[in-house]
Image: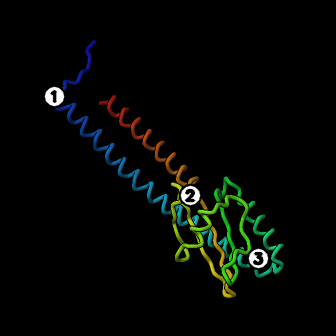
Amino acid sequence: MWRWTIKHDSLRLRLLLAIVAGVTGISATAMTLDYFREYRLGLERIVVSLDEQAGALQEAHRLITDPSQFMHYVHRFCATMDHRISPGHHIMILGPDGEILARSRQYSNQPLEQAMLSMSGNRALMTLDRHSVACVRRSSPDGYTYLLAQYLDHEQAALRTQLVWRLVFVLLLTLDRKSVV
């Protein structure tokens, strides 16, 4: 029975290392680019969803004129945002003079509210205490402002898990190729 061995300075070993390095490098680059593309698409999906929710709140505010009933509606609206569907949701509605008319009870905290109030533009991506937050502002013609925010930790964790599994797959594939050669 003869054994197949690889000498340390052989052409076969050098070709094997070149192939493994090439496959690993190309795969790592592709995975990184895919991660950032998926993150951008996920962020855009979340921002569009927040904008649609702001529109729904604006329409509900137009229909529900009693302030206490509207505040109750905002609490219920935010409570229906299940943590598996939309984790880390926060809602604030400002009156024409800037006072806070309603806010959600879920996930409320002072730094997030300050960041939401001070954001410039209609969309923002902020970092608070090492957490990424997407934020949307929508103003109505009658002077009301609807601010919605969502933490992105859930989205980032899912993408990181996917990246790790792809890396494990590439490493296993590389090791399999190494055993064939």
Q: Say which residue appears at 41% left-offset and 50% top-offset.
A: 31
Q: SS of the residue at dot 2? A: loop
Q: Residues within 10 Å of mark 1 (few under 14, many from 20)?
A: few
Residues at marks 1 and 2, CA–CA distance in whole angstroms: 50 Å
Q: Nearer the viewer, residue 19 or 28?
A: 28
The amino acid sitting under disc 1 is Asp
Mark 1 vs mark 2: which is more N-terminal? 1
**Residue 18, image quadrant:** top left
Q: Would you name the residue on which mark 2 appears?
A: 152
Q: Is residue 37 left or right of residue 56?
A: left
Q: Nearer the viewer, residue 99 or 30?
A: 99
Q: What whole-number distance in Å separates the C-alpha atoms at marks 1 and 3?
A: 75 Å
Quadrant for the N terminus in the image: top left
Relative placement, left or right, of 47 versus 177 is right
N-terminal of the pair, mark 2 or mark 3, is: 3
Q: Residue at x 62, y 66 (%)?
A: 113
Residue 80 image-quadrant placement? bottom right
Which residue corresponds to mark 1?
A: 9
Is residue 92 placed above or below 153 in the rendered structure? Answer: below
Position of residue 141 relative to residue 164, above or below, is below
Residue at 25% over, 34% down: 16
N-terminal of the pair, mark 1 or mark 3, is: 1
Q: Residues within 10 Å of mark 2 (few under 14, many from 20)?
A: many
Task: Give the residue at mark 3.
Answer: 60
Q: Secondary structure at mark 3?
A: helix
**How was this image coloured?**
rainbow
| Mark 2 to mark 3 CA distance (whole Å) | 26 Å
